[in-house]
């Protein structure tokens, strides 16, 4: 090999070496930049995470403070309201004259509504805070739902509604549940129906669907717009929140139903549309069902 060829080869090797060194410098600089970018990203993520944690803690503290305030307020109001109710009931027995009797009856009805609102508020706050342990006892589905229908029948008649209970069960089923919360759930559903539904039939039915118990309450309309259903399941929200709304209500009934279902591990489903009947279905898991009271006791 001649000296000229050796020189060309040497120059070629030098160019390749310089190119390799330049590539290594570029790669090193790129890796360093990537490392710094990752460090900056980690710093920002940690910073945002801390901000979110603080915001979450503040929101939780605010919820606790609100729940505590509502609970204390409800307790403080409940005693004087009960006193007013008692005095009005006594006055109703003693008052003379048709007009005076109507005035006392109106005041008594208003006080009862206020008492019910306070009870709802206390119940919701207790469920939200986890206060009060749930009890478990065997409850006959048919008997309990028939009692609900019987209790609400007189109130429904005032709204020109007729409550019926149809059991589609092939046996007597028992459910292991907190009886008071179970009754409260269906009382809230019926209260909502009696207050807002059209005159007509209110059908309560119970049946087994794929090994789960489904209890449905269907009214006669007027129905609920689909886009407002989820809103109505939030506390203190109504289908019509305007200041000129025609229907009464605190916006707590359905939210309380949803919270009770969550605590009892039931499934809540509402099927409705404007101009159509509304059907509220409560799904209860097979794990808490049995066909005898003795077996139900074993679930406790």
Image: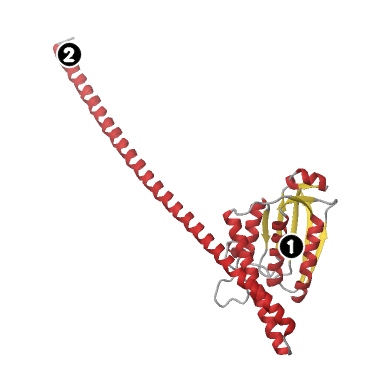
Q: Residues within 10 Å of mark 1 (few under 14, many from 20)?
A: many
Mark 1 lies on a secondary structure that is strand
Q: Is residue 77 above or below residue 207?
A: below
- Residue 293: x and y in percent read 82, 48
Of residue 256 and residue 267, the one placed in the foreground of this image is: 256
Q: CA distance from mark 2 to mark 1?
A: 98 Å
Which is nearer the eye, 162 or 142?
142
Residue at (38, 44) in percent of width and height: 46
Q: Is 184 above or below relative to 172?
A: below
Question: Is residue 200 left or right of 21 when viewed as pictured?
Answer: right
Q: Secondary structure at mark 2?
A: helix
Q: Is residue 47 rendered to the left or right of residue 161?
A: left
The answer to whether residue 275 is seen in the rendering is yes
Left or right position of 2 against 161: left
> Is 73 on the left-hand or right-hand side of 59?
right
Q: Please, is residue 98 above or below residue 50 in the view?
A: below
Instruction: In the rendered structure, find residue 6 and report the number of the disc placed on it.
Output: 2
Give the label on residue 217, or none.
Answer: 1
Q: Position of residue 113 (x, y in %)?
A: 65, 73
Say how the picture is coloured: secondary structure
Q: Quadrant of the N terminus?
A: top left
- The residue lying at 68 percent from left, 75 percent from top is 86
Residue 251, percent from left and from top: 60, 67
Quadrant in the picture for residue 127:
bottom right
């Amino acid at each position: 090999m001649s000296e000229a060829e050796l020189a060309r080869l040497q120059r070629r090797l030098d160019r390749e070496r310089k190119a390799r060194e330049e590539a290594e410098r570029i790669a090193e600089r790129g890796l360093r930049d990537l490392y710094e970018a990752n460090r900056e990203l980690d710093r920002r993520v940690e910073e945002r995470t801390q901000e979110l944690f603080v915001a979450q803690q503040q929101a939780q503290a605010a919820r606790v403070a609100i729940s505590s305030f509502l609970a204390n307020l409800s307790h403080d109001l409940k005693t004087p309201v009960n006193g007013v109710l008692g005095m009005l009931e006594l006055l109703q027995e003693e008052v003379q004259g048709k007009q005076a009797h109507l005035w006392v009856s109106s005041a008594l009805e208003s006080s009862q509504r206020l008492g019910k609102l306070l009870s709802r508020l206390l119940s919701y706050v207790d469920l939200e805070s986890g206060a009060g342990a749930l009890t478990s006892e065997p409850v006959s589905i048919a008997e309990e739902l028939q009692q609900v229908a019987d209790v609400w029948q007189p109130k429904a008649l005032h709204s020109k509604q007729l409550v019926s209970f149809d059991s589609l069960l092939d046996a007597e089923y028992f459910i292991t549940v907190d009886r008071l919360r179970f009754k409260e759930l269906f009382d809230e559903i019926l209260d909502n129906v009696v207050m807002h539904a059209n005159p007509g039939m209110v059908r309560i039915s119970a049946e087994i669907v794929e090994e789960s118990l489904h209890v449905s309450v269907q009214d006669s309309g007027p129905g609920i717009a689909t886009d407002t259903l989820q809103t109505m399941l939030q506390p203190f929200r109504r289908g019509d929140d305007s200041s000129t709304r025609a229907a009464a209500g605190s916006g707590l009934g359905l939210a309380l139903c949803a919270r009770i279902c969550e605590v009892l591990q039931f499934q809540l489903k509402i099927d409705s549309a404007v101009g159509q009947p509304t059907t509220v279905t409560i799904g209860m898991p097979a794990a808490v069902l049995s066909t005898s009271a003795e077996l139900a006791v074993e679930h406790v």
